Amino acid sequence: MKLKKLAALIPLLYATSAAAIEPFVVKDIRVEGIQRTEAGTVFSYLPVKVGDTLDDEHAAAAIHTLFATGFFKDVRLEAAQGVLIVLLNERPSIASVEIDGVKEFPKDQLRDNLKFVGLAEGRIFDRSVMEKAEQELKRQYVARGKYGVAVTTTITPMERNRVAIVFNVVEGDASRIRQINIIGNRAYSEADLREMMKLDTPNWMSWFTKNDQYSKQKLSADLETLRSFYLDGGYLEFSIDSTQISITPDKKDIYITINLNEGAKYAVSNIKVAGPESILPHEKMLKLVTVKPGDTFSRKELTASTSKIGDRFADDGYAFANIDAVPELDKEKHQVAFTFMADPGKRVYVRHINIAGNTKTRDVVIRREFRQIEGAWFSASKVKKSKQRVDRLDFFSEVNMETPPVPGTNDQLDVNLAVKEKATGDFSIGAGISSGEGLILTASVTERNLFGTGNYLSTQINTSKVNKVYSVSYTNPYYTDDGMSRGFDIYQRDTNTASTAVSQYKSSTKGGGVRYGVPINDDETIHYGLAAEQTKLSLTPTSPSRFVDYVNTFGESTTNVLGTAGWSRDSRDSVIYVTEGVVQRAFSEVALPLSKQRYYKLTYQHQWFRPLGRDLTLMLNGEGGIANGYSGKPLPFFKNFYAGGPGSVRGFEPNSLGPRDTDNSALGGNKRLVGNAEVLFPMPGMAKEKSVRLSAFFDAGTVFGPDNKVKGADGLRYSTGLALTWISPVGPLKLSFGKPLKTQPEDKLQKFQFTLGSIF
């Protein structure tokens, strides 16, 4: 059989005369040399079919097409008596990809990055792709400042035309920033600008913060911080002209130079608005603009004003309103005027509210938290509030909301809520220690979403050397369809003051009750309830005479029917890491005439949070309480108020303030006054860590007895100091160091105080 080689790859691609053949009609096609690739796959790519006439041009096109698939490293065409023979040499496949020597990154993350450049198990091996993968690994390290990284690759052939690839990584040390230069600044010193940046030269905290390690992402964030600072300070034409990154030959030290152009400082000369007054009158639109003529230009305020106007339109159903602040610059006077152009677009309403992902929680439990309803005009604030309320249920690990337009319409959209269920029942046992309570043991069984209904059931045991509490609680948050809640409590509370600053006595209280909550709005609720409890008292030889007189008069055992009423308002932006908002609580407890005793207790608390800057938050807290007997009966001594220690006036021993008996033990009182001022800020080097927070505080407060009069601050105690709150892996830790500022000789001081809870 006479075979005639039609062409090799290069001659055919360039159709040289040396490879020229006489055209022939293809009677049959045979594929040889394939192992993994199916013949049908080859035929699907081959542009030559039986019956076609094959010449130089078609042969070159066939070879080019087969090479382009990336499956083969050699392609040849031969002919024998009208049969086209396709001779193929397959590229090997990748059997495995290993990455050795990696500590900086999770290996799975690096493998995912290599997939993006085309290198993964099961794919065809291509040396050019492997080189790209090496560069990708190096890029990942360079982005974290490790310029000395070295990557070598080992390729091991395996049976069945496969290869194993191993990347050997020598990470090296991170390059350190030796110098940061800022050029072009006139209004602010380089030291002030450097203070805003996260990147820094080595200092005593660098081992922890690692801010002396260069990374492109950190530098980009710092540049944006500088840009925002200048634009918010009036420098409308501010720009960063260039940044130069220089590295020493040994790749250990980095020098950063930032060239900026401040430009002139601009003031706002005039504000105008434009848009359809039938939807939002210009007068009302102007009230939403926080930027005023005469103010220094601020991009932050401009953006806030634009957002407020957009939100106002969105609340009226104009979900896709476009608000644009058009500037008019006067470069000679360094002034700028803005016209807020409002294009509301089409008013839209909500077609459907779709909920997905709730495998346990019933739909009704989620839907009753929605403030946006189907068939109504879209409201951005109601949709946002709906998401917040579903999130606050604490039944889901993820809550995502989307508002896609309905296809084929221009006035409808859907609200799609996707949730991911999480465990809502738990059994826990724990231990903790407190400078005031001593060793605390806890155990509880809790289900926050009973059978998917949203109802709450909890049993709890809490013990310490001072207080022991055993309780069972059940709450239905939607006892009625309009959000009225109902709950039941059964409890036993034992108190032993023998090892505290309080005058000695023992009490054991058993009780139960029912309570209701009536929402006024999304942030306010009225509470009321009814309970019955029995208290048994036990005194010691060292108990004060007034305690003895009370027991002799009313007996060691008393039964009371208690009526409670209260009001609360909570508008905080977070429960754990608060930056703004207000908390108000008012509560009253009254022993009703059915009781053996007659007394009332009234308390009020007001907390106020406001941001002082990017990382600073001011907290002001005020608490007051008053209690007394009525119908000629005194206030039971075990219902007295106490103050001192964590939660009131730090630096003083817990519950030690106020009237005292003859052995200097605290008696408590019927009036309580506490005030706290606290500046909260993140731990240095941990600004993004929400679980750790420091604070500087000033506390004031005391307790007054029936014979004391509150005149000015005569009886108050003051303290100041530092505190730390850490939501640690072993439980919440609270530390404080308080220095009393005003004391009396009989005061009991305790400068260092802490509480630690541990779940195991």
Image: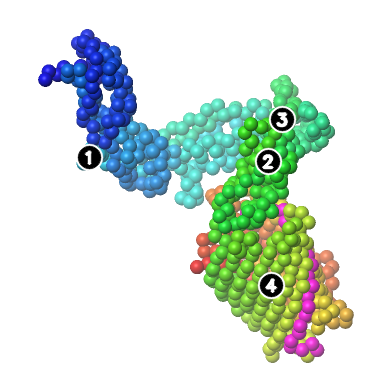
Q: CA distance from mark 1 to mark 4?
A: 72 Å
Cα distance, mark 2 to mark 3? 18 Å
Mark earlier in primary sequence (4, 2): 2
Q: Amino acid at mark 3?
A: Gly
Indicate the quadrant where residue 428 lies.
bottom right
Decide: is 711 above or below 629.
above
Check disc 3: other Cα within 10 Å, few if <14, some if 14-19, many if 20+: some
Instruction: Compare residues 378 and 235 and report the one nearer the observer.
Output: 378
Instruction: Residue at 64%, 73% (x, y): give it.
Output: 472
Question: Residue 225, percent across and down?
Answer: 59, 38
Callout 2 crowding tier (Cα within 10 Å): few <14, some 14–19, many ≥20: some
The type of residue carrying mark 2 is Arg
Q: Is residue 246 left or right of residue 126?
A: right
Instruction: Report the span colored magenta.
Output: 553-580
- Real-space Cα distance between discs 3 and 1? 63 Å
Q: Disc 1 residue type?
A: Arg
Residue where numbered disc 2 is placed: 351
